[in-house]
Amino acid sequence: MKIGDLVRFIGFEEYRILQNNDDISIGVIVAIHEVYGKTRYDVSWPNGSFGTWLYPETLKVIHES
């Protein structure tokens, strides 16, 4: 994943429930953090909120930039 990719939050697999597939749940990656060999992502959501330090396994790429 890279800055500008469109992603959907899917959560962790063991807690995943059926997701609504409308476009309102699609955000854009705005920052990438590398800490102690781990990658985390900040995502801007269409409602104006930001997801910070999200784990890569909780995001699904919808469209690459």
Image: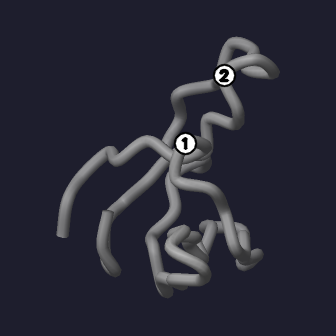
Q: Is residue 33 above or below residue 58?
A: below
Quadrant the C terminus occupies = bottom left
Residue occupying image coordinates x 36% and y 60%: 6
Identify the amino acid type marked 1: Glu
Q: Measuring from the top left, give residue 62's x and y in whole percent.
A: 32, 45
Q: Is residue 22 above or below residue 43?
A: above
Residue occupying image coordinates x 60% and y 79%: 36
- Element on which disc 2 rests: helix
Q: In terms of depth relative to the viewer, which is nearer, 48 or 63? A: 63
Identify the amino acid type marked 2: Glu
State the residue lying farthest toward the right: 15
State the residue lying farthest toward the top: 18
Q: In terms of depth relative to the viewer, which is nearer, 24 or 30? A: 30
Circle number at residue 9 = none
Circle number at residue 57 = 1
Please count the marks in the image: 2
Residue occupying image coordinates x 34% and y 80%: 3
Question: Which residue position holds label 2?
Answer: 13
Residue 40 quadrant: bottom right
